[in-house]
Every structure is written in C-alpha cells, then in structure tokens.
Image (spheres, grey):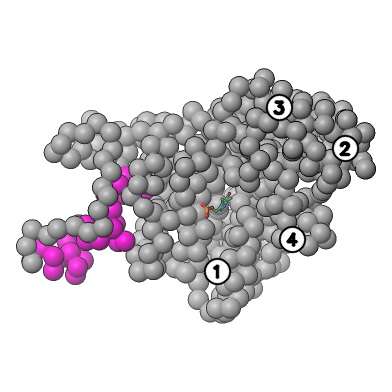
Amino acid sequence: MDKDWKGKPETLAIHTGHRRTPEGEHSEPLFLTSSYVFQDAEQAADRFAGRVEGNIYSRTGNPTVRIFEERLAALEGGERALGTASGMAAILSVCMGLLKAGDHVVVSQSVFGPSIALFQMLARFGVTTTFVRLDDNAAWEQACTPCTRLFFLETPSNPLGVLGDIAALAAIAHRHEALLVVDNTFCTPFLQQPLRLGADLVVHSATKYIDGQGRALGGAIVGREQLVTGEIFPFLRTAGPVMSPFNAWIFLKGLETLALRIRAHSETALAVANWLAAQPLVERVFYPYRPDHPQYALARAQQSAGGGVLSFALKDGDMACAFAFVNACCLMSRTANLGDTKSTITHPATTTHGRLSPEARRAGGVEDGLIRLSIGLEDRADLLYDLERGFAAVAARGGRS
Ligand SMILES: *Cc1c(COP(=O)(O)O)cnc(C)c1O
C-alpha cells in the first residue's frame, strides 16, 4: 500500500493499529502482561530515560491498549487517544491534566449525573464551575471569567436530546482562551466528529456503544498530541486509571462493527420515535432526528443520524403511570445502562436524575411521566409489541391516579 493511502472510517475501524507479530496472528493479540523484559540493562536505562520508545510497564503503555487508541484516534480525526479505566476516569484525567486551583470551568447543566458531581468535587481543590443551559450560547459566553480554562458538554443530552452547537461553542471558548471538551459517548465518531467542528478534546465512555454489548467498563480521551500526550498523559501514567488490556481488546473489536451497529440503532430509534409520536397516550417525543425537534436543523448539520436514545412523555402522566408502563414491558431490560444490543427502559426522574431536587429536575424538563429508551438491535416489530404492553397497562389504569 502506498504511504499516503488513507482508508474510509469503516476500513480504519477494522485495520488501524494492528502490527502483526512474528506469530502471524490475523485477529488482534491480547497482551495480558503487567511488565516487559529488556534485552539488556542499557535498553532498560534508555527506555526509563525516555531516550528510546518501548514498553516498560502496562500503567504507562500496553500493546493491546495502543491498538484501541490508534483506531479511535483515526476515527475521531485526532492525533492521539488514551484509553482509560472508565468514562469517568477519562473526564477526571482531563481535569487533572489541565486544571489547577484558581481555574474556572463552564459545564452544561445537562451532562451525565456523575460528571456534574465530579465538577462539584473539584471545588474542594479550588476549581470552580458554572453550570449553564446547553442550548443557550449567550449563557456560555456570559459565564466566562478571566480564569475560565474549559467548556465541557455532551450533545445530544440525556434524556431529552437537547443539542449543543459544537462549532459555535468552540468559537466562544477559543475567544476566551478556553478549551472545548465534548463527551461524544452518545453519537460515537460515526455520527459526529467534534474535533472536526472545532472541539479541542473528545472523551468517551467506551462502556456504551463502543463495547456495544454491555460487557466492560472503559473510556477514552482524544485530541491534539500536545494536549493529550503533553498535559493529560503525565497524570494518567502516574495515577493509573488506565484501560485494562482485556477491556481494550473488547473495545477494539467493538470498533470493528460500530459503524453498522450505530446506524442500525439509529434507524430503529427513529422508527420507534415516529411510532410513539402517533400514540394517543403520548404527549411528546424527544429525538433529535424528528422534524418536530426544535434543533432539527442543527441535528442534521452536526450529526449524520439521531443515535439510539430517545425519550417520551406520557400524556397527563404521573409517576404511577410511568411505573406501570415500565413494569409492563418484558423484552426491554429495566436498567439505566445504554448503548447495548439489548434495548433498555428507564424512568429518569427516579433513577439517573433521582439525585436532583424536584425543582431542578422539572427545570431541566425531566417530568415524572418521562420514559427513556435505549434502542438495541432487536427486531423493530418486537420492540413495538413490547411498548404496546406498556400502553395497555397505562390504559388499564384509566390515566392519572
Ligand atoms: C456512562 C457515561 C459516562 C461515564 O462512563 P463510565 O464508563 O460509566 O464511567 C460519561 N458520559 C456519558 C454520556 C455516559 O453515558
């Protein structure tokens, strides 16, 4: 192959990063080893001194993890990626690598619950946070102070599918000499590439779509060499919240089928969203790729499909209605996880968003009658049949109690 040849993302997801060993293995090897042997004392000295690249210890680098990192970097259009022990470890490592006491960050109020809690914990170390509405660009601008170092957001948001305008928010961040970090867990690089829209760093919970089969915990950070290797890697290699080689092997195999999976998740989710919108007991459906979404144009511009997560509000639905619906479903799993081949059903107000005060929850639009679905890879008609069980249970109750 000529050296300038660069494959399409579907090809990169299958081939990038694997340098075959003398054993001639076809599938990527799994290096379950904590340390590495040096040819002689001189080689050990050179590697420890950083004069020569090479393996030392799996906290500082592992060949299987490296395949995953090179593959994900290629897909996100980043220079360098780092695998981490979980999605939260990725976010923590970004903060520890880039922030110091006295710094300020601006964070979307609609990020994953533990991400909010993590930024609140940073106050103990002198890093302050302002939470703003994801879709209110002026609020991001107004929140900036001379100490602002980072913007952090997820788009689309969970559970209501609100979007952040990545290009616009990157421009605002850069005007204030801050960096934009985007959690791309929901879209994956096959639906959205934040770095190409101006973001400085992407983080992932690989636990979700990158694994895609609900098996392993992991995360990743992607971006420019200078940020990732220069500023974040020193924390990661020292503190050690790194990805295990076994999990890296699962995730790099997950990347090989990710394009097919995320498109199938998205197609079924759109069909389910459209079907739900036509149900008499549904008040409203929240899905970025439906024309009734207030940011539909942005969704079409920024994402190549809507993703696998959607929510809907039951008409006049209180908590008892929502519980009746959730409890009547048999095929979809009652679990808060998402991005799995198995569809899942969640009542956000009492689970993922249960720690918020009722006022904060309602202000964020998470009503008691709201139900979230993560659409898996099952047959579409079977999923609709399961949802019909939910509607039958709500109808049998005669509406609001
Ligand atoms: C799950 C999730 C995380 C945290 O990832 P873990 O792997 O569970 O630590 C972060 N962001 C988003 C959007 C998530 O869904």
Residue on which the image places disc 4: 356
Residue on which the image places disc 3: 386
Residue pictured at 67% horizontal, 20% vertical: 381
**Res 268 → quadrant:** top right
Please tell me which of labels 4 and 2 falls first in the chain: 2
Mark 3 element type: helix
Please tell me which of labels 1 and 3 falls first in the chain: 1
**Residue 282 placement, left or right of 239:** right
Report the label total. Answer: 4
- Whether tag 3 and tag 2 are in contact, CB under 8 A, the answer is no
Please tell me which of labels 2 and 1 falls first in the chain: 1
- Whether tag 1 and tag 3 are in contact, CB under 8 A, the answer is no
Give the alpha-carbon distance from disc 3 to disc 2, as whole Å. Answer: 19 Å
Q: Position of residue 28 (x, y in %)?
A: 28, 38
**Residue 103 placement, left or right of 211:** right
Tell me the number on the disc at residue 149: 1
Residue on which the image places disc 2: 315
Report if residue 90 lies within the magenta region. Answer: no
Report if residue 50 lies within the magenta region. Answer: yes
Give the alpha-carbon distance from disc 1 to disc 3, as whole Å. Answer: 47 Å
Q: Judge whether 349 appears above or below 343 on screen.
A: below
Whether residue 70 is visible to the viewer of this picture, yes or no, is no
Residue pictured at 30% horizontal, 47% vertical: 64
Along the line of sight, the residue nearer the viewer: 58 or 401 = 401
Looking at the picture, which amino acid does disc 2 mark? Lys
Residue pictured at 45% horizontal, 46% vertical: 216
Nearest-to-viewer mark from 4 and 3:
3
Image quadrant containing the N terminus? top left
Mark 4 element type: loop
What is the span of residues highlighted in magenta in the rendered image? Answer: 42-70
> Are there few (<14), some (14-19), or many (20+) residues within 10 Å of tag 3?
some
